[in-house]
Image (spheres, rainbow, N blue to C red):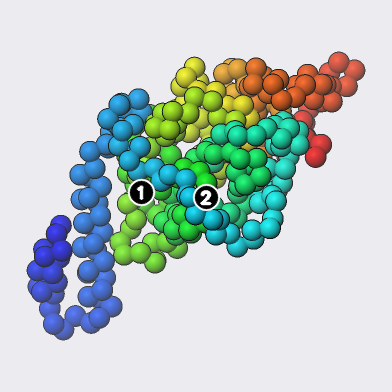
Amino acid sequence: MLLREVLNELEKVPRHVDQPQAIQIEQDMLNKEAVGDAAERSFVGKHQEDPSLITEVKKLINPPSTLPYNLTRPFKTHYSQYRQSELADALFLKGKKNGVFVEIGGHDGETFSNSLYFEKTLGWTGLLVEPDPIFWNTLISRQRKCYAIHAGVAFNERASVSTTINVQGRRISQAGKEVKGKPVINVFPLYTLLKALDFTVVDFFSLDVESDEMKILQTIPWDKIKFRLIVMEKNHATMGLSKIVEFMEVRGYTYLGEKRIDAWFGLRELLQENMNLDEYLNQFYTDGKKTTNMIIPF
């Protein structure tokens, strides 16, 4: 619906309608316009490996900022909520420099960030993915030195859009109160995002989508991408930790244990470059038997 059409429709609103009702009528029209725009997006329905989809996504990814950081706490070293970046570096990555991260759930680019330490301190680059319009605006203002995209991550292998206030488990209803109409969020498969940046090896993958982690993991073509280290929130997982571990182990990933809200996994062939994996895993065995709960001692 064009703006002229909206104005024409508004002229039809009876003069006796009070202001709140008139505002609601305008809001409904804008919502319809947003849905129409979503339907016109040419990438909707395309498979994650479709070259035209990958090309389109490349255009939507923001490049790393060349400006100085604009952080609220610039003198901090680690920004994670529960020391995730500190744990990852101390136990598994061992000061690795110039790596690549992917953080799904980039938030505002600073608060609870699992990737900012690696970017600031060790010279990493990577990708931040954030669907929430309000968080996104703040994230961009932080001047991060990595790629970033305002999008959700798909639960299947095809691109889509969402006009719901609930995107991949992350409530954005508050954002809906601050922008006209329901936000139209692009939703892309994770593999499409990685292909758009030519990422074939990701050194640190942080996945936090509030219970929908497995839906995203199930879309990944595991023979085409490698992750050195993965941290994913397990607290809200509907299928239980044991099922997640089984899923990951079948795909060649070693379960490294849990800590607070997260489960950790790694690919042996890559982790061995940074650490002695067998020595690390031996601490979870007593008299040759594996302990029931692998709580990471950190």
Residue 209 or residue 41, whichever sits in front = 41
Residue 266 position (above or below residue 133)? above
CA neighbours of label 2 inside 10 A, class few (<14), some (14 to 19), many (20+): many
User: Residue 281, which numbered label?
Assistant: none
Asked if 82 appears above or below 178 in the picture, the reply is above
Instruction: Please indicate whether residue 27 sits to the left or right of residue 166 in the image.
Output: left
Alpha carbons under labels 2 and 1: distance apart = 22 Å
- Return the residue nearer the eye: 250 or 282: 282
Which disc number belongs to residue 185? Answer: 1
Identify residue type, mark 1: Ile
Q: For residue 88, what is the image quadrant?
A: top right
Image position of 222 (left or right of 72):
left
Residue 124 seen in render: yes
User: Residue at the location (63% across, 30% down)?
Assistant: 229
Element assignment for label 1: strand
Closer to us: 207 or 116: 116
Q: Quadrant of residue 294?
A: top right
* Residue 9 locus on image (x, y percent): 12, 68
Q: Position of residue 26 (x, y in %)?
A: 22, 69
Query: The residue tagged with tag 2: helix, strand or loop?
Result: loop
